[in-house]
Amino acid sequence: MSSALQLDIAGFLADYWQQQPLLIKQGWPEFADPLAPELLAGLALEEGVDSRVIEQRQQQWLVTHGPFEDYEAFGEEDWTLLVQSVNEWFPEVQQLLEPFRFLPDWRTDDVMISFAVPGGSVGPHLDQYDVFIIQGLGRRHWQVGNRLSDAAEHRPHPDLKQLQQSFTPCIDAVLETGDILYIPAGCPHHGVALEPSLNYSVGFRAPNTAELAAQVADMLLATEQQFPRYQDPHADSYGPAWQVSAPQLTHLKQFLLDHLRGDTQLDTALLQVMSQSKRPLPQPDHEIDAAELLAYSGTDMLLCRTPGARILVGPDAVLYANGEIYAVDSEVMDFARQLAALWQDQPLC
Amino acid sequence: MSSALQLDIAGFLADYWQQQPLLIKQGWPEFADPLAPELLAGLALEEGVDSRVIEQRQQQWLVTHGPFEDYEAFGEEDWTLLVQSVNEWFPEVQQLLEPFRFLPDWRTDDVMISFAVPGGSVGPHLDQYDVFIIQGLGRRHWQVGNRLSDAAEHRPHPDLKQLQQSFTPCIDAVLETGDILYIPAGCPHHGVALEPSLNYSVGFRAPNTAELAAQVADMLLATEQQFPRYQDPHADSYGPAWQVSAPQLTHLKQFLLDHLRGDTQLDTALLQVMSQSKRPLPQPDHEIDAAELLAYSGTDMLLCRTPGARILVGPDAVLYANGEIYAVDSEVMDFARQLAALWQDQPLC
Ligand SMILES: O=C(O)CCC(=O)C(=O)O
Ligand SMILES: O=C(O)CCC(=O)C(=O)O
Ligand SMILES: [Co+2]
Ligand SMILES: [Co+2]
């Protein structure tokens, strides 16, 4: 498979991914904007689309959430329109994710697109996500620093987190169409548009322990399964009722962690969580079964992946899609793998 | 401390608690009903009180949820009124828990009281809770079996789980005032009132792994703390994007479990969960601070525990109450321990 990217992937994984920022000049040499600023602006007029405009006006930061009615009030300078998960709305934008599939699908978050007019910026900040920013239309000046372990953040506006202190950039460059900036989670960055410009943020999520625990627990609770219940029989005395002793606390902790570690239920729940889509996906009008699907083979029917869908195959050769488990017969497992691998529309063979 | 119970506690813990049922004839010899059936029936007229009436009518099971307006429709036979957490409404009922404080406070669930007319029953069933049923007014015929590992349950009514098969009782007795029946979680039981009668169910909760994980995760998420984020740098290749290999899954699982095990955050969250009250407690009109409290000492002011409150001291000598953490100075730690131990109203010394 020839990649759209000009990138030594093995070298990138070894030295940069999740470690340090990298500017990949002309990382996507043939890059062509999959949409025009007008189309992005039009999308942000729609209900259900997560969008915002960030403006800087006389040292003040303003945030306005979409849906918008028009953009006239924002003027010619110093604002950015950001639209989340554009890949779920435009299949062409979903295709931008494909060259990044040298990274695991379950880590993919979404493609956020920003359109900025000259001077437009969201300010210096850091994210909990790893991101590749592809420069489309126009040019932006980007500065990126190395990971900060304890960056002080402040909120110049309730909906905007920025860095309190300035940072020393290790990358300071004007991005042109086809340039890619890789920014690991936790690295400060600051971009300012030099002219009307589009940036495509291909984001990768990384759950923290608390988020992952909550998602897994919800998944476990949603199953109809039985789980072991806490027990501590044969204690000869518990001591004062109100006192939780160190051994008692340890016993409870072991109960929780040992069972989670030992049960395949946790593996299954993790795979379900990994396959959860970012937002609920549109439901088909009509569910298709294997027999019906087979009846279409040989026709000119196209297989298209729902943008935003996450389809994984676990080590147990079970298919996980959008939080659900599909135990597939071994004869159709090859087809299931094809479905999981599919990104571009393909004829059904 | 002399106990109201006639029970060899060490023997009970060694041989029965969480293991097998036990009938303790005259286990509470001086037992006097803390409330009359009329008062219980009156409580179930109130908004916010969790109550239900279960009736058997011509082989049909009916369930009606409170609040009730009156009880006339139910007639003279074959129904039971059950009211949950009566200890939270009547301090006298909260006092019924005290003799059971040879068991840890965090395991306490509530005191459920049932009033049954002749023939009244909820049917044969099992619970996920350990329970002591104290016979108050009247007599009830109880049968209890040994733990069933895979009991088939059915729902003769959407709000009623019963056992599908009959069970072989290992206890078959008519309970009289002052008798106590101990039923471990998972043991089938069936009680039928012989005459108008009151039963007090002192219940003990035991979370299962999924419930505990969900509670702990919610607690962790509610803190303002930072948690480690998933990382897997230095992979030379991830393989196909859609494939979750066994080592990848193991890595994610280790990330979750190893951090949880290693961080004191989990200990703290567990202690918070252990101290959570069953339902939100009434909030004080006015919060009292240590200085104000000290100013009352020597007066005839009484210290009263809010019924339903859970106050624990952790191995870290920190006070946990109702899900909150109270880091107490070492000088007031003795007083904090007194508060945690307090059950009956006591003068402030
Ligand atoms: O597009 C922008 O201006 C901001 C992008 C960004 O900060 C990000 O993707 O993390
Ligand atoms: O009071 C009753 O009739 C039912 C009590 C019961 O089943 C229990 O406490 O588990
Ligand atoms: Co950012
Ligand atoms: Co029961």
Image (cartoon, coloured by chain):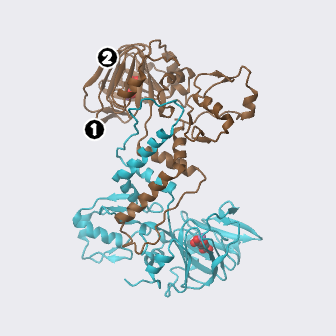
Chain colours: A cyan, B brown
In the image, is residue B123 above or below residue B266? above
Question: Extreme left residue here?
Answer: A331
Numbered label attached to residue B173 = 2
Q: Quadrant of ligand 2?
A: top left
The reply, left or right, for residue A77 in relation to residue B1 is: right
Q: Amino acid at mark 2?
A: Ala
Please name the residue that numbered disc 1 is placed on. Answer: B150
Q: Position of residue A262 (x, y in %)?
A: 35, 51
Q: Position of residue A235 (x, y in %)?
A: 41, 32
The reply, left or right, for residue A71 in relation to residue A30 is: right
Question: Extreme right residue here?
Answer: A58
Same chain assignment for discs 1 and 2:
yes
Asked whether B199 or B62 is in front, the reply is B199
Q: CA distance from mark 1 to mark 2?
A: 25 Å
User: Which comes before the other along the chain, label 1 or label 2?
Assistant: 1
Asked whether B1 or B179 is in front, the reply is B1
Element type at mark 2: strand
Q: Is residue B141 visible?
A: yes
Whether disc 1's CB lies below 8 Å from ligand 4 is answered no
Q: Residue at x 34, y 77 (%)?
A: A346
In the image, is residue A247 above or below residue B241? above
Image quarter of residue A167: bottom right
Chain at tag 2:
B
Q: Amino acid at mark 1?
A: Asp
Image quarter of residue B24: top left
Quick one: label 1, few (<14), some, or many (20+) residues within 10 Å?
few
Chain at tag 1:
B
Element type at mark 1: loop
